[in-house]
Amino acid sequence: MSTETADSPMIARLPAERAVIHPRWVRITHWINAVAMVVMIASGWRIYNASPLFPFVFPDSITIGGWLAGALDWHFAAMWLLVVNGLVYIGLGIAGGRFRRKLLPLRPGEVIADARAALTGRLSHVDLSVYNAVQKLLYLGVILAGVVIVLSGLAIWKPIQLQELTALFGGYEAARYVHFFAMVTIVGFLVLHVVMALLVPRSLRAMITGR
């Protein structure tokens, strides 16, 4: 009986239709993270509108919560879902070695070369089980942005109780800016992620079916 896992070299010898690219736990946590992030972003925009950092606000039509208190309820509910699900995702990714196999090593030269190939339309997407250097950088970056947005959010939420954490971000107002730009980073990643899924539909199918 075979003991090959979803990330095993055996994938290379399987037909494309049968090869498991994303195991079930990756797909489940991926979609939970996606829902949690969308809810957090949309509710966060409503919270931002109550006290803008910049001379603009987000249209009410793309926010959720109805008013500040309602948006806060949605935001915190999604935050805890994101934290718990994110810890499961990161824990399994590290414990099972998936992160090491998929995201490392990451070399600057490879990132530059793959970025040039992507901009000129020459970046290959034949083998979805192998991440190119740009994908590695983006996935590592969005994981880091996720950690920053949660920690800065906690610093804003409980600036007295978590004063050491708030101080780490430079104070309450500075933590708000860090939180905002972490959100911008994540939104940028999501937009690029969706665009790439539309350009390479097989990648979307793989995240739904695993193959």
Image: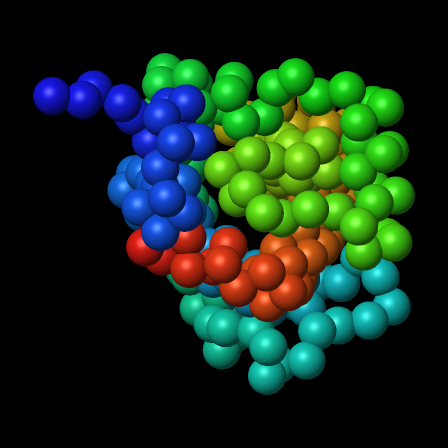
Residue located at (67% from left, 51% from top) = 189
Q: Please, is residue 118 above or below residue 151 in the view?
A: below
Does the rendering let one see residue 36?
no
Colouring: rainbow
Q: Where is residue 92 drawn, in percent x and y?
A: 35, 25
Name the quadrant of the N terminus.
Answer: top left
Locate residue 20 relative to residue 161 in the image: left or right.
left
**Closer to the camera in the image, 119 or 125:** 125
Residue located at (57% from left, 73% from top) = 63
Does the rendering let one see residue 89?
yes
**Which image quadrant for residue 159?**
top right
**Which image quadrant for residue 170?**
top right
**Closer to the camera in the image, 204 or 79:** 204
Locate residue 179 relative to residue 114 in the image: left or right.
left
Q: Please, is residue 150 above or below residue 206 in the view?
A: above
Q: Please, is residue 96 above or below residue 133 in the view?
A: above
**Closer to the camera in the image, 209 or 82:** 209
**Which image quadrant for residue 156?**
top right
Q: Where is residue 20 drawn, in percent x and y?
A: 34, 40
Residue located at (60% from left, 35% from top) = 131
